[in-house]
């Protein structure tokens, strides 16, 4: 193994040992502070749930779901029971039974008042005299309590027998954490989108902005309602019907994921002669509101950057008029709370400020100062593929006069559709040629309340990176790229397939596992020395091949819809990797297998959409796993015909 790779693994192991020494639960995102007591508690069924009036139905339902999925019946009660296990849910109000219980336990509630932090909450697990689990959750609001349930879920994953007692003081460093579906390609299916919502709820992500470039009702037909019916072929390339959109918004609401539907009116938004654009946008927003959308976005990206200040000011006026129209329609006094709409999200033409010189960028963002302060203005930093950093945030915030939101193109692969980015964060930075390979994440990010990532066209495989983003956005300082990556596989697949996915992940990527390159070099040296020694290489390839076969059993396993969707994402890469490792093993053993047409075999191919608006086209591409070392090595073996 390469010395640098070995050093990285040793450091990750040391970090993991340090974590396990202070945290008896493997909770992600990593909590801000956990205090353990030398006691244990056991959840006994049924578990009484006592919820304050400030706790909404979605949070109560989530509590019931978490308990039920761990074999625990739940009963809603009006008062704290005198015996048995219970879960008390409350907000920071003196009358809440949960707050009273924290006071009895002498637990400091200071974290709930911490300025500049979000989703602040406290979890306390103590035993009754008979050892029954008594859990208290108090948050700054019901959304914060919902976040706390993600920690409870992972605590229960360890088993509800003899659970370590603890108090967790927790909060997020970034307010809005999530996904922007804004890549060029086939939009996610309804099944994948809904599954992502559930994953987000489990790992405390709360924002999903939908702006799929290839959705014609986002761009080309932006002022037309979604159709009531679509054909199977339309569904295959990402069309959505009204019922499908209702299903998406309902699932998002249950998962406490704020689903933002974005419109792309293109150049119409900056057209001084178009006096109907606001009315047309509001007409579409009315349609989407009926389908369950409660926050909107406006994209005017990728249509050219205006240099005329009059056009810049027109865009600012239109954005202001649109926000005022939304407020007058849904946010007036007396309006039903469930109908209210959150502030607009705006992706301007100059979302990467480095496209123009500094003075022009300053003028552009200053033109947006007149827009309502609550409107979220998005940037990607100096460049399209910049990693969130304080320098860019500070600079643009000064120009804009308020904080900005970050659209992070990561682990987006629409520029590299044959590649997968499923390594740890910093390895992905090196693999993704558009990202600065030496970029690092800030130990304390400031100047933004929003970090949302633009993922790969493979939504399920994107979970590896999303798991890391959730961890980082929640707790900047505690983020450890390698430790997080090792933990991600169980989070993505569950324990059954985690080790197999971990084994093949470095080979599903384009650049192979680093160690393979050295094994190949060692084998070639042994051949040159006249004493071929293929065994170490065969052992490695056999282990990868076996892991491929294990993952290829997923379609026969009906226990997890998430894993079935994951398999569809990785199928072309997985099948090609299985064939490559099998061929290499056979050649190393002196056999002469029939060569595989890797570039044209349908099993290794997938379809992508390109373009937007009137120029959406379907293409077939071939997956490219293990292309740096294994693919040329197979060619070398066939060319040299070396025998072991």
Image (spheres, rainbow, N blue to C red):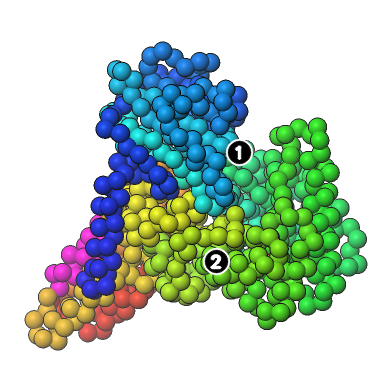
Picture coordinates of residue 416, whole percent (x, y): 50, 71
Q: Relative to residue 609, is residue 158 drawn left or right?
A: left
Q: Quadrant of the C terminus?
A: bottom left
* Residue that appears at 65% across and 73% down: 353
Q: Is residue 543 magenta?
A: yes
Picture coordinates of residue 123, whole percent (x, y): 43, 34
User: Between tags 1 and 2, which lies in front?
Assistant: 2
* Residue that appears at 31% across and 76% down: 629
**Nearer-the-camera pick, 71 or 469:** 469
* Residue that appears at 44% across and 14% down: 81
* Residue that appears at 26% across and 75% down: 517
Q: Is residue 312 above or below residue 290?
A: below
**Nearer-the-camera pick, 346 or 633:** 346
Q: Is residue 524 above or below residue 254?
A: below
Residue 253 circle label: 1
C-alpha span from label 1 to label 2: 32 Å
Q: Relative to residue 609, is residue 516 drawn left or right?
A: left
Query: Which residue is tagged 2?
Result: 390
The residues colored magenta run: 534-546
Tell me the element at label 2.
helix
């Amino acid at each position: 193994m390469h010395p640098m790779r070995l050093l990285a693994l040793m450091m990750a192991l040391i970090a993991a040992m340090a974590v396990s020494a202070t945290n008896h639960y493997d909770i992600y995102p990593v909590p801000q502070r956990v205090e353990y007591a030398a006691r244990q508690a056991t959840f006994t069924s049924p578990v009484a749930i006592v919820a304050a009036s400030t706790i909404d139905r979605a949070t109560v339902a989530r509590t019931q779901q978490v308990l039920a999925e761990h074999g625990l019946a739940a009963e809603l009660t009006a008062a704290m029971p005198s015996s048995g296990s219970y879960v008390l849910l409350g907000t920071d109000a003196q009358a809440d039974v949960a707050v009273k219980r924290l006071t009895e336990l002498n637990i400091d509630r200071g974290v709930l008042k911490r300025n500049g932090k979000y989703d602040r909450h406290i979890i306390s697990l103590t035993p009754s005299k008979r050892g029954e689990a008594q859990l208290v959750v108090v948050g700054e609001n019901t959304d914060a309590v919902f976040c706390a349930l993600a920690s409870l879920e992972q605590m229960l994953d360890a088993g509800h027998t003899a659970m370590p007692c603890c108090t967790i003081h927790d909060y997020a460093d970034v307010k809005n954490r999530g996904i922007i579906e804004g890549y060029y390609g086939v939009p996610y299916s309804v099944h994948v989108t809904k599954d992502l919502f559930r994953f987000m709820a489990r790992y405390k992500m709360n924002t999903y902005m939908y702006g799929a470039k290839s959705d014609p009702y986002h761009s080309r037909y932006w002022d037309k309602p979604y159709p009531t019916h679509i054909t199977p072929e339309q569904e295959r390339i990402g069309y959505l019907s009204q019922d499908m959109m209702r299903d998406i918004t309902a699932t998002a609401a249950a998962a406490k994921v704020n689903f933002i539907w974005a419109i792309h009116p293109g150049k119409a938004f900056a057209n001084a002669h178009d006096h109907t654009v606001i009315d047309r946008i509001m007409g579409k927003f009315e349609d989407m509101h009926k389908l369950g959308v409660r926050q909107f976005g406006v994209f005017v990206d990728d249509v050219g950057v205006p240099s005329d200040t009059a056009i810049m000011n027109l865009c600012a006026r239109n954005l202001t008029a649109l926000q005022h129209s939304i407020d007058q329609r849904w946010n007036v006094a007396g309006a039903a709370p469930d109908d209210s709409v959150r502030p607009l999200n705006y992706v301007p033409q100059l979302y990467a400020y480095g496209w123009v010189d500094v003075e022009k960028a300053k003028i552009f963002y200053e033109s947006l100062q007149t827009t309502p302060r609550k409107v979220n203005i998005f940037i990607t930093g100096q460049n399209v593929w910049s990693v969130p950093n304080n320098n860019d945030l500070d600079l643009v915030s000064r120009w804009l006069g308020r904080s900005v939101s970050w659209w992070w193109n990561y682990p987006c692969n629409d520029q590299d559709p044959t590649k997968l980015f499923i390594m740890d964060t910093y390895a992905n930075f090196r693999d993704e040629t558009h990202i600065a390979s030496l970029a690092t994440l800030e130990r304390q990010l400031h100047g933004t309340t929003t970090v949302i990532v633009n993922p790969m066209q493979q939504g399920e495989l994107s979970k590896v990176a999303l798991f890391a983003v959730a961890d980082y956005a929640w707790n900047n300082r505690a983020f450890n790229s390698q430790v997080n990556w090792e933990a991600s596989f169980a989070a993505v697949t569950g324990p059954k397939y985690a080790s197999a996915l971990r084994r093949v992940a470095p080979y599903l990527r384009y650049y192979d596992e680093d160690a393979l390159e050295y094994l190949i070099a060692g084998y070639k040296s042994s051949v040159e020395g006249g004493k071929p020694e293929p065994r170490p290489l065969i052992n490695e390839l056999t282990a990868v091949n076996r892991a491929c076969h294990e993952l290829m059993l997923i379609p026969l396993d009906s226990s997890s819809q998430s894993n079935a969707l994951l398999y569809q994402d990785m199928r072309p890469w997985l099948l090609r990797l299985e064939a490559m490792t099998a061929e290499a093993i056979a050649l190393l053993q002196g056999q002469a297998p029939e060569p595989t047409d890797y570039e044209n075999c349908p099993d290794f191919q997938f379809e992508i959409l390109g373009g937007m608006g009137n120029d959406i086209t379907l293409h077939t591409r071939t997956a490219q796993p293990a292309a740096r070392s294994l693919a040329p090595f197979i060619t070398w073996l066939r060319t040299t015909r070396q025998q072991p």
